[in-house]
Image (cartoon, rainbow, N blue to C red):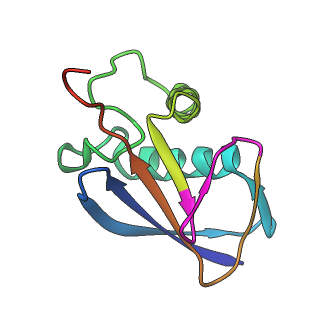
Amino acid sequence: MTAILIRDETGTGISRAALRFDWKTRRHLRVRDLIAERVRLEWDSNGVSSPDSEETALIPQDAPCIETVEAAIDHALKAFERRAYLVIVNDHQIPHLDDDITLNPDMTITFMRLIPLVGG
């Protein structure tokens, strides 16, 4: 079993305390599997994102169409493809959903939400 520490950040430096989950099934996973597990963690702990984590959560608070965990996962995967957030593993950006990640006990995974510039 591999314990993974996950932290959330925004481009403005706002950071949220690390989450932890145990990945029991294998030592390798794709980015899409990591995102899906991250969304399930958030969904299971809150049902929806909590008010203080709106900027960094993968499940948006103001999306009434997200009523199931599957819809939340689909939304998060599409947001990753649109570059709404980055996945950074040990200080290296992972750019594609089908890229493999080899899990190890000392790794840090960061979900960095990008904030659009106002005014173009």
Q: Nearer the viewer, residue 107 or 38?
A: 107
The quarter in which the N terminus is drawn is bottom right
Q: Nearer the viewer, residue 51 or 97?
A: 97
Vertical comparison of 71 with 8: above or below:
above
| Residue in the image at 64% along x and 83% along y | 105
Instruction: Give the residue displayed 40% in from the left and 36% down from the top.
Output: 59
Q: Is residue 35 left or right of residue 120?
A: right
Q: Which residues are magenta?
A: 88-98
Is residue 111 rendered magenta in the image?
no
Residue 50 versus residue 29 in the image, above or below: above
Q: Which of the 4 image quadrants contains residue 47? A: top left
In the image: residue 120, left or right of residue 8: left
- Does 83 sit left or right of 101 as displayed? left
User: Can you give x and y, in whole percent of width and height, for residue 102 in the image?
Assistant: 76, 68
Residue furthest top as drawn:
65
Q: Residue at 26%, 43% (x, y): give it.
A: 55
Q: Position of residue 118 (x, y in %)?
A: 20, 26
Magenta segment: does it hold 97? yes
Q: Residue furthest bottom?
A: 106
Q: Position of residue 23 (x, y in %)?
A: 67, 67
Question: In which image quadrant can residue 90 be found?
Answer: bottom right
Percent across and percent down for residue 110 are: 47, 61
Residue 55 located left or right of residue 27: left
- Image quadrant occupied by the C terminus: top left
